[in-house]
Image (spheres, helix red, strand yellow):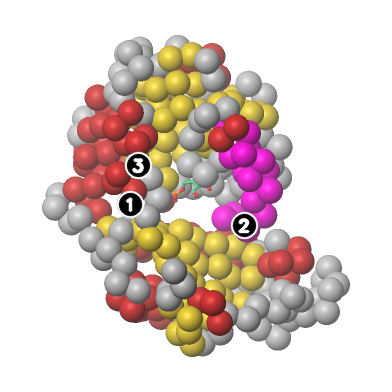
Amino acid sequence: MTDTRTAWFDGNFQPLADVRLSPMDRGFLFADGIYEVTAVLDGKLVDSASHLARLERSAAALEIKLPLTIAEIEQIELELVARNGLTRGTVYIQLTRGAAERDFVAEPDKPTLLLFTQAADMLASPAVKNGARVITMPDIRWGRRDIKSVMLLAQVLAKRAAKEAGAQEAWLVQDGYVTEGASSTALIVTADGTLVTRPNSNAILPGCTRAAVLALAERDGVRLEERAFTVDEALAAREAMLTSASTFVISIVQIDDQQIGDGRPGPIALRLRELYLEMARGTN
Ligand code: PLP
């Protein structure tokens, strides 16, 4: 079937198939750009303000000027969701420094902004019911992981290795400590029921879902500790889970060859998923 999706590019809504990016775009040549992914549930954007604030922060960190206001970008997202009749899936935003002669320090006339939607049924993935498996891998990424850069090669390699191993995610490890998942935040529940996740810093992407889930957990009376945890601690954890905009909260039932808990999704992960979905649907 032909792709009938509408995208937004360079000031216009247009068929995605008609978008003509320059081969000289610095996003393509240098990975000189940033992106955002926001979930769509029941046709509504989930946690939109948080994603748009991070888009603004990432752009500022790379000194790329957003060509539109945050409010205008949100309007385009909503219009794309409507035009594409999207009920469940994601909206993707990419901003690059623009197109110019290939030169490390070129300053293009204008940035490139592209938005498109992707349909996905995040509520029906097998990992929701059965839990996910993760493998651990060395974290070989650069030192500014707090910027949501399109430079995702390390993550692509990690995800490929995970897939090869029959796992759904790779947990990245530095100096014996888990930094985060290749495309998600990593959390564990210790034997005494404490939810542990790494504090925000340059070492990880400040997850929008992470922030929302920690607030919900706190409100629900879950004990929280923001600190780095080791792979050994994760292997011995009562529960493990991951959070991301496109998966919400997913329980982890296996890390490398080690079963976590009783091998089924844990109660805290399931509860946090339920609370997050209620929030996303505006019912709590
Ligand atoms: N960490 C990394 C490296 C990611 O790529 C992502 C999402 O893509 C996350 C964490 C989770 O962030 P969010 O919850 O904002 O989607």
Q: Looking at the image, can residue 190 be seen? A: no
Between residues 166 and 34, which one lies in front from this camera angle? 166
Residue at x-position 14% and y-position 52%? 283
Tell me, yes or no, whether the highlighted magenta stretch contains residue 143: no
Please report the residue visible at 31 percent of the width from the left and 21 percent of the height from the top: 264
Disc 2 marks which amino acid?
A: Ser
Looking at the image, is 260 positioned above or below residue 218? Answer: above
In this picture, which residue range is highlighted in magenta? 147-162
Using the image, tell me which numbered label, if any, was put on residue 121. Answer: 1
Q: Is residue 193 left or right of residue 132?
A: left
- The three-letter amino acid code for the residue at tag 3 is Ser
Give residue 254's position: percent from left, percent from top: 45, 21
Residue 27 lies, in percent from the top left, at: 68, 67
SS label for mark 2: loop
Q: SS for tag 1?
A: loop
Residue linked to disc 3: 125
| Most common secondary structure along the magenta stretch | helix
Q: Position of residue 139 (x, y in %)?
A: 66, 34
Nearer the observer: mark 2 or 3; the answer is: 3
Q: Which residue is mark 2?
A: 149
Residue plotted at (44% across, 69% down) = 1
